Amino acid sequence: MTADTTILNYINGNLQAPQSGRFLDNYDPSTGSIYSQIPDSDSQDVQLAVDAARNAFPSWSSCGVQERSRVMLRIADLISKNLDALAKAESQDNGKPMWLSSSVDIPRAESNFRFFATAILHFSSEAHRMEQLAINYTIRQPIGIVGCISPWNLPLYLFTWKIAPALATGNCVVAKPSELTPMTAYLLAKICQEAGLPPGVLNIVHGLGGNTGQAIVDHPEIKAISFTGGTQTGRTIAATAAPMFKKLSLELGGKNPNIIFADCDFDEMMDTTMRSSFSNNGQICLCGSRIYVERPIYDRFREEIVKRTRDLKVGNPLSEQVDLGALVSKAHLEKIQSYLKLAQEEGGQILCGGAIIDHKEAHLRNGYYLSPAVIEGLPIHCRTNQEEIFGPVVTIAPFDTEEEAIALANGTVYGLASTLWTSNLQRATRVAEQLQSGIVWVNCWMLRDLRTPFGGVKNSGVGREGGLEALRFFTEAKNVCLKY
Ligand code: NDP
């Protein structure tokens, strides 16, 4: 399997150019150069995808869970078989280290298919008996044609996280990956062909969010939208979809707090905090970007995080030696730089990082590399601590009481994930209950059980993904009341 230089849409089982014939440049963030072309699709292509999905729906929705499961497991097997090629493509497209895409992104894409292919075999619905009167039973039927729109940070991982439950429940899908990272979605289309997924069941339309993505959200026959991306885009999508009464699942941005109490296991906390701060260059919606540390260990923590952050190696994503690769795009690099400038204007002190990497290798000099940064001295209400930066940047601050830590953690409009470090079980449960976030990790981070509900509160989203939540989202519940 090769990453071709011209990416094509996948519609009705065929790989095809966009109707307009227009293509966009796709950049390799590690070098800053154009390495492939991607369809600049519009509403004509989305219409073709909807037509194909409509035709495929009757047989896909009625072929039975065993058959759907079988095809999806074949897709999972082929993802596994092509792990190296997919991991390389993901790294080239996104800039992330290949060790990361081959150990996290691609294995997780495989797991997503495997998990939902088998979960559907165990999906059941409820019955409610009215004594001596009637029995109610609930049928969960597929919605029809659904739209799945995903971001660039975990490209195949998040794309398949949506597509797999949608397909398992018998829907036909029109999907759009981020235009910044389209390559593995294109390779997935080839895998679906090889796996024998019937034409039209999954359609992948590439292009810009405001054009292709908006055409998916606008389309009246697409009855549900599952979206992961920024809060502002989520707002636009909700504004379009709500008056059409579409079902919506919105997984949006975060500004996640880490609360570190002095009684934690310091070494384990440090190792994990480095990961939760800088994995994937901080470009994971679950990364902790505001770190609050109880005062007795603050100085020790400060010294350690600065030392370890300085030691992180930033460079060629294909090298096994690097900790961090390139940022996804020039625009994103510039956005992060603008936040570093803002942090200083707001009175923050950059303790380390924030500089463009000066590479010895000539071909990497135009890549988007930034040294990871730790900032101190900023109040909770400044923009640096309120807005999502989504890069290798964390702020650190001390706290004195549990109440203060909770107030700091909850002090933004976001509420996706929180991380809590303490060896006091009572405190862990007490604080976890008061944190305004959809996910709380205690003494760990990114430990994921795919059966658990996943999603955010406040401006971090609406609805939950994962396990039964996803199967329920992609089905309509119908109650049948049968009088005795
Ligand atoms: P964006 O919101 O910019 O884009 C997400 C997707 O939506 C892309 O495919 C984009 O296309 C598309 N899109 C943009 N505008 C529209 C529109 N009007 N209608 C339909 N689709 C549209 O997010 P990013 O790609 O920049 O991803 C980063 C964001 O994602 C961060 O805020 C991060 O927190 C969030 N995120 C949330 C997660 C969660 O689970 N809560 C997980 C991972 C990331 P295009 O790329 O072409 O613009």
Image: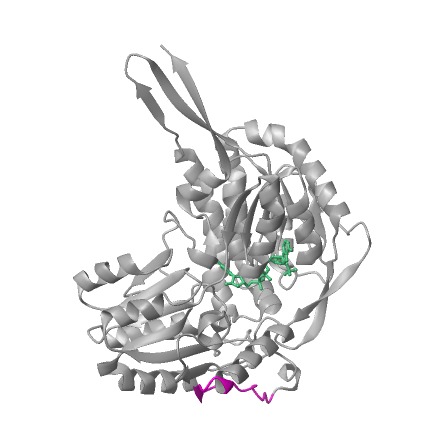
Quarter of the figure with the C terminus: top left
Q: How many marks?
A: 0
Asked if the magenta segment contains residue 356, the reply would be: yes
Q: Is residue 331 visible?
A: yes
Dominant secondary-structure state across the stretch colored magenta: loop
Specify whether 114 is left or right of 407: right
Figure quadrant, ligand 1: bottom right
On the image, the x and y values in percent for residue 109 come to: 50, 53
Specify whether 9 is left or right of 255: right
Vertical side of 293 occupied by 470: above or below: above
Could you tell me which residue is drawn at 44 percent across and 36 percent down? 120
On the image, the x and y values in percent for residue 160 come to: 53, 50
- Residues rendered magenta in the picture: 345-360
Q: Is residue 230 visible?
A: no
Give residue 482's quadrant in the image.
top left
Quarter of the figure with the N terminus: bottom right
Could you tell me which residue is drawn at 56 percent across and 75 percent down? 326
On the image, the x and y values in percent for residue 344 come to: 49, 86
Could you tell me which residue is drawn at 67 percent across and 34 percent down? 54
Specify whether 484 is left or right of 383: left
